[in-house]
Image (cartoon, rainbow, N blue to C red):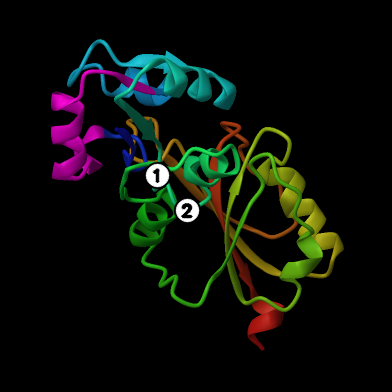
Amino acid sequence: MLIVAGVGPGNPKYLTREVYELIIQEENIIAFGRVSRTLQDIRKDIVGISSVGEILEYIDKYENLLILASGDPLFYGITSYLKTKGYHPDKICPGISSFQYLSCKCQIPWNKARFFSLHGRDFNLKDLLEIPLAIGFIDKNHLPTQISKALYELGIRGYLIIGYDLSYEEEKIERIPIGESCSDITDLAVMVIENEVAQR
């Protein structure tokens, strides 16, 4: 049986009960490095991997496998990748996405937000010109300061909220005017774009 489970933003206290029980029960478990290290107090034999290609090797190796993914596995998650490769999980368990975590911390309703991801994807920031609220996942090739400057050049004004290391002890959340520099603490972060021009 192939199971994909979301572990939430990172801190084990945000695991669902169902996913916690799977981590205890399942024999073969893999997860990306940081996730596997975070869950060591629950289970020490979680195999840490560093690339999506490794996942396919483990699926072919084990009849039963639990894949732990950060956030929710169906929101810009690993499940879509698996399906493009012909692997269809028998079970998918939800997790809290880091954007949900950040939205709650900042008390920002997200039901009308436009979502985007820059994790290994192309996205044209011009698509946000008319969007009052956008929430995105950024990576090492698209750092917050870079995006801040690019949005300003496009004529977008307002504020950015950037969440780094969300749910971990080193968590930092900052709010800056669009166009200014920010901390660029880590290469994985969540960004909220409050576009005041589109809100008028």
**Tag 1 near tag 2, CB within 8 Å:** yes
Instruction: Measure how far apart labels 1 and 2 are at the Cα level.
Output: 8 Å
* Residue density around tag 2, few if under 14, some if 14–19, many if 20 or more, within 10 Å: some
Check disc 1 and give the amino acid type: Gly
Q: Which residue corresponds to the image point at 39% horizontal and 30% vertical from the top-left? A: 170
Image disc number at residue 185: none
- Looking at the image, the residue that sits furthest to the top is 45
Q: What element carries label 2?
A: loop
Check disc 2 and give the amino acid type: Phe
Residue at image mark 2: 75
Q: Measuring from the top left, give residue 180's x and y in whole percent.
A: 72, 52
**Left of 102 or right of it: where is 113?**
right
Q: Quadrant of residue 145?
A: top right
Q: Is mark 1 on a helix, strand or loop?
A: loop
Q: Measuring from the top left, give residue 41's x and y in whole percent.
A: 19, 18
85 or 120: nearer the eye?
85
Quadrant placement of the C terminus: bottom right
In this view, 179 is above or below 132: above
In this view, 200 is above or below 74: below
Q: Which residue corresponds to the image point at 65% horizontal and 77% vertical from the top-left? A: 196
Residue at image mark 1: 71
**Which stretch is magenta?**
12-30
- Looking at the image, the residue that sits furthest to the right is 153
